[in-house]
Amino acid sequence: MAFAEDKMRDRLLRLSTCMNAAQISHAIIGDHAVAAWVATIDQSAVRNTQDVDILIRRADFDSTRRALEAVGFIYRKVAAIDMFLDGPAARPRDAVHVVFAQELVRPAEPLPNPDVSESTDLGPFRVINLDALIRIKLTAFRDKDRTHLRDLIGVGLITGSTVATLPAALAARLQSLLDTPDG
């Protein structure tokens, strides 16, 4: 298990170092953003996953591709998802998944993704701001997103007062989680 965590951390560090060196605006989102925010309160409550999700502007895709391929990542498009596999033997779970800023992931979603400017340095990585992360998770609202939101609720990063800061469609989703914390 420690080996898998080391590989994941190496992937995240190589990605961040590469993107910073190439001066490409980006933010870590998804599982690792949730983990980074949860760790600010309670490191023992952090969950780890292998893949890394990165938010970039579509206009930066070509420069991102050149930068990541230069450090050994291999571009693939799998099931309409742009990703960079971590080497020739890697699988999609060993990849960097690209999400585009200010775009919808799925047509029926209530809000587009935030811009990369809504981010902060949180340790060795540039991570999406907490309020933007909450909006992303509430917009997608898949089972794993609800789990991540419950993790943020569990450590006190989301409270009842958060509901008032959200658009109506997202506020209702968050209220449903707050009303049923055990799912």
Image (spheres, rainbow, N blue to C red):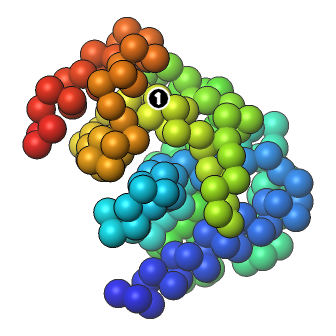
* Camera-side residue of 163 and 117: 163
Q: Is residue 98 left or right of residue 66?
A: left
Quadrant for the N terminus, please: bottom left
Q: Is residue 29 above or below residue 73?
A: above
Q: Residue at x 68, y 66 (%)?
A: 124
Give the residue furthest to the top. 168
Q: Amino acid at mark 1?
A: Arg
Count numbered badges in the picture.
1
The quadrant holding residue 182 is top left
Q: Is residue 6 above or below residue 22?
A: below
Q: Position of residue 35 (x, y in %)?
A: 44, 58
Q: Residue at x 37, y 30 (%)?
A: 138
Q: Position of residue 89 (x, y in %)?
A: 54, 83
Read off the residue under disc 1.
135
Q: Is residue 168 above or below residue 37?
A: above
Q: Position of residue 22 (x, y in %)?
A: 88, 60
* Camera-side residue of 82 and 33: 33
* Camera-side residue of 33 and 78: 33
The quadrant holding residue 157 is top left
- Tell me if I can see residue 5 in this picture: yes
Q: Is residue 103 above or below residue 117?
A: above
Q: Is residue 154 left or right of residue 163?
A: left
Pointer 1: residues within 10 angstroms few (<14), some, or many (20+)?
Answer: many
Q: Position of residue 87 (x, y in %)?
A: 62, 79
Q: Is residue 32 left or right of residue 54?
A: left
- Tell me if I can see residue 144 in this picture: no
* Camera-side residue of 97 and 35: 35
Badge 1 marks a residue whose secondary structure is helix
Q: Residue at x 12, y 32 (%)?
A: 180
Q: Residue at x 82, y 60 (%)?
A: 20
The quadrant holding residue 112 is top right
